[in-house]
Image (cartoon, grey):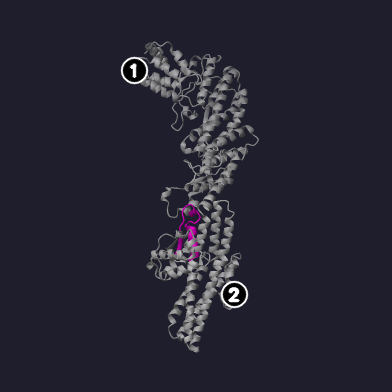
């Protein structure tokens, strides 16, 4: 192997290929073409050169194809090195790595004070621009400035292998520790010459590389986000006046390194779209930063740059990079992402009031970083669809199954559980409209699931700008559109009010003739034990009654069905109001008759099931069961009225025994009828009237749900069906004692009156009176704590002539003594 080949294996390989192919150019011509700047070079021309010099060479087509792919992704010089490596007797890349750094581009030479040639200036600029565009190669490259033996020349483009966590285009002081820069004793040379050397070193450091006289002293971690602050040490050989000015410039290198580290980490997909957009925006700013360094180096090469001028030129950039480094450090340390990043940037804008230049950069960054977030938001408020692969959006979709596989009670959970707001993901500039954003998408989603096409009336362009509130207006317009359309779907196309009226007819006993006929038809079946009741029989009797009564004109009568629950009213009420396990799950049946377990069920389809969901229907059923049970007790008390005629057959002395029983029956009838009247006329009807008034002025579906829930809750509370008191249990006991009394009268009516009969009636009287007085006292206690409730009206109805006052006073005195 000749000496030339040993010194420059790349030129040797080129010369050999040119001789074999008889190409009409030299090795220097080839190198010059591959060093041409990106704007001037043509990949097609470079491939043509390689094709010419590889003529008649083995596997030339294969290597040319490989070269064409490398030209698309790598630096052209790297492509040339890789191509020549196939035809060289030695490994060119390895040989270049092993060569001493000073051989190709000496840091200091005997002519180090000579003027830099113009050719080298263009190459330095090209190298910096390449670095800005990520085009630096990872291998040593011979440059046309190899003959620059004058001023302190920049080191070669070669970068050693970086840590696997670092990307190829990033320079980091920690990744080039194996490079040893030549350092001569310059303490004796003039300050002007030291200044030139120091300026070159400053430019190296500002691009992320170590210099000869400025080295990174330590890397200090700033927190759990692995952000680091680099400190620098300037050689004592440099004059102190120059060192002082250099120390003011060097923080810029630390800021640059911090930003570059952030860009590396944020470029990964798992970091989220907002961080990726911010990383891309920072990359654009870093390109401008590299161009500034290229201009500084050009000025230095022509002898027009001093450290004072350099400080003056970089001062605005120094302030801006300081702000940006602080921002990315906060993001890394606190591991922010998505809306949290946008909140930090937005708050930073306000904090920079007075620093217009830095504020302008942060505003620009905020706008660019918010683009993917606002695109997700626009899709949500425009279509009701969430496209959020990295879980950054403020609305979270909890859907895990297809709609055809929805569970039985999906409609009830849909509105509250399908879409939820994640408060920690809300950017501060969207905090005030976060609920509107949630409702807008939910409305549109329901419309889509109804099979309707969602077409906004105008083109939506949702962009965030910190300087105006246009995005708020766009969101509000989208909300009004979605709200109006869903209300039309519910109220007009699906007749929500018609369904609600139908529910009232059957579950709140509003259709009086139907209820009477149904109870007449089903009385015998419902008197059986619940396990012996045939649901099919009840369904048939229901259908017959619906078609024989005035309910036959109801278009929704077929939505009503019979249901036998597995528990009594008290158990159902306790489970709902205490938020225990869902009461529709199977339980062991109690020893109950059909009447105690019976309820109507109302079935509706989507989207009406959003309003009449299983929870709402369950509340209707609770009201129905109490009303239905009281109506049954009233019917039984009316039945024994005819037993009064039996007394006519007895002697006056015997009939006297029945008088107390008839009086007790009348008191029971009065209590039960007033209880029914109170619940239906004083509670349900006024609340229904208020509900209808509210429904006439609703503006969105959330108001519909809220008004409907308020109606049901108010009815349940004033009908004493909440678990906050024991009123419902007292009512249940009162009804049971009335039924027992009716059974007693019917069984004793054919018997001759006796003292035993009189004593039994007296015991019933005492038990009934005790329960009723206890109920009145409980109502008085509850009414005193809640004056706005209607409970006290029931007391005035039952005790209208103060008949029970004396007994109540005695009971209160007894309680006070205890």
The tag on residue 761 is none
Callout 2 secondary element = loop
52 left or right of 790 in image: left
Quick one: label 1 or label 2, which is nearer the N terminus?
1
Residue 341 at x, y percent in the picture: 54, 39
Specify whether residue 283 is in view: yes
The tag on residue 800 is 2
Of residues 807 and 618, the one nearer the viewer is: 618
Residue 507 at x, y percent in the picture: 49, 63
Quadrant location, the N terminus: top left
Q: Which residue is mark 1?
A: 58
Residue 760 at x, y percent in the picture: 47, 81
Quadrant location, the C terminus: bottom right
Position of residue 313 relative to residue 13, above or below, is below
Of residues 577 and 715, the one nearer the viewer is: 715
Position of residue 177 relative to residue 603, above or below, is above
Callout 1 secondary element = loop
Give the extent of the magenta segment.
599-625
């Amino acid at each position: 192997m000749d000496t030339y080949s040993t010194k420059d294996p790349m030129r040797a390989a080129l010369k050999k290929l040119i001789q074999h192919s008889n190409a009409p150019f030299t090795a220097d011509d080839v190198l010059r073409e591959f060093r041409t700047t990106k704007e001037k070079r043509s990949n097609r021309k470079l491939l043509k050169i390689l094709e010419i010099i590889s003529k008649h060479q083995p596997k030339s087509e294969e290597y040319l194809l490989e070269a064409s792919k490398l030209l698309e992704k790598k630096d052209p010089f790297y492509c040339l090195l890789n191509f020549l490596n196939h035809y060289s007797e030695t490994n060119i890349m390895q040989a270049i790595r092993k060569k001493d750094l000073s051989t190709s581009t000496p840091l200091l030479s005997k002519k180090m004070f000579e003027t830099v040639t113009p050719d080298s200036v263009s190459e330095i600029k090209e190298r910096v621009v390449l670095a800005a565009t990520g085009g630096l190669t990872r291998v040593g490259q011979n440059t046309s400035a190899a003959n620059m033996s004058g001023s302190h020349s920049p080191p070669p483009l070669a970068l050693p292998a970086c840590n696997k966590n670092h990307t190829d285009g990033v320079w980091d002081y920690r990744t080039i520790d194996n490079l040893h820069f030549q350092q001569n004793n310059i303490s004796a040379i003039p300050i002007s010459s030291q200044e030139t050397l120091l300026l070159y070193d400053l430019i190296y450091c500002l691009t992320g590389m170590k210099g000869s006289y400025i080295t990174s002293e330590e890397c200090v971690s700033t927190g759990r986000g692995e952000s680091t602050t680099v400190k620098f040490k300037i050689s004592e050989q440099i004059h102190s006046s120059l060192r002082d000015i250099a120390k003011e410039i060097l923080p810029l290198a630390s800021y640059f390194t911090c930003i570059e580290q952030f860009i590396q980490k944020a470029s990964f997909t798992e970091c989220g779209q907002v961080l990726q957009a911010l990383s891309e925006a920072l990359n654009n700013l870093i390109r401008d930063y590299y161009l500034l360094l290229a201009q500084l180096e050009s000025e230095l090469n022509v002898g027009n740059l001093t450290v004072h001028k350099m400080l003056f030129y970089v001062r605005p950039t120094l302030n801006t990079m300081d702000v940006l480094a602080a921002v990315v450090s906060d993001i890394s340390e606190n591991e922010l992402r998505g809306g949290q990043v946008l909140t930090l940037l937005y708050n930073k804008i306000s904090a920079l009031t007075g620093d217009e230049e830095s504020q302008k950069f942060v505003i620009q960054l905020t706008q660019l970083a918010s683009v993917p977030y606002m695109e997700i938001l626009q899709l949500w408020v425009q279509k009701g669809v969430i496209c959020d692969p990295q879980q950054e959006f403020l609305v979270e979709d909890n859907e895990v199954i297809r709609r055809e596989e929805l569970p039985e009670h999906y409609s009830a959970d849909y509105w509250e559980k399908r879409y939820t707001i994640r408060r920690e993901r809300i950017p501060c500039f969207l905090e005030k409209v976060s609920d509107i954003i949630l409702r807008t998408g939910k409305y549109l989603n329901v419309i889509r699931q109804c099979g309707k096409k969602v077409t906004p009336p105008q083109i939506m362009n949702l962009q965030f700008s910190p300087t105006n509130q246009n995005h708020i207006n766009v969101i509000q317009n989208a909300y009004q559109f979605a709200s109006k359309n869903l209300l039309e779907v519910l109220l007009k196309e699906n007749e929500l009010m018609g369904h609600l009226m139908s529910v009232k007819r059957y579950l709140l006993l509003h259709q009086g003739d139907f209820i009477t006929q149904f109870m007449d038809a089903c009385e015998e079946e419902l008197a059986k034990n619940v396990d012996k009741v045939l649901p099919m029989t009840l369904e048939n009797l229901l259908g017959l009654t619906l078609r024989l009564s005035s309910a036959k004109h109801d278009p929704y009568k077929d939505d009503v069905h019979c249901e036998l629950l597995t528990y009594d009213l008290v158990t159902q009420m306790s489970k709902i109001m205490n938020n225990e396990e869902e009461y529709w799950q199977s339980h062991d049946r109690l020893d109950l008759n059909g009447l105690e377990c019976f309820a109507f069920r109302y079935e509706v389809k989507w989207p009406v099931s959003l309003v009449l969901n299983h929870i709402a229907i369950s509340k209707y059923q609770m009201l129905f069961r109490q009303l239905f049970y009281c109506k049954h007790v009233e019917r039984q008390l009316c039945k024994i009225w005819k037993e009064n005629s039996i007394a006519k057959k007895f002697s006056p002395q015997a009939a006297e025994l029945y008088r107390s029983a008839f009086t007790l029956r009348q008191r029971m009838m009065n209590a039960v009828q007033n209880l029914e009247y109170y619940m239906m006329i004083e509670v349900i009807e006024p609340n229904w009237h208020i509900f209808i008034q509210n429904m006439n002025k609703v503006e969105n579906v959330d108001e519909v749900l809220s008004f409907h829930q308020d109606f049901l809750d108010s009815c349940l509370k004033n009908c004493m069906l909440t678990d906050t008191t024991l009123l419902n249990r007292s009512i249940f006991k009162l009804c049971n004692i009335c039924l027992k009394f009716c059974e007693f009268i019917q069984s004793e009516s054919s018997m001759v009156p006796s003292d035993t009969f009189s004593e039994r009636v007296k015991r019933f009287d005492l038990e009934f009176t005790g329960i009723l007085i206890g109920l009145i006292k409980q109502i008085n206690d509850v009414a005193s704590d809640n004056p706005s409730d209607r409970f006290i009206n029931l007391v005035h109805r039952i005790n209208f002539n103060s008949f029970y006052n004396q007994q109540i006073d005695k009971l209160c005195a007894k309680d006070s003594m205890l």
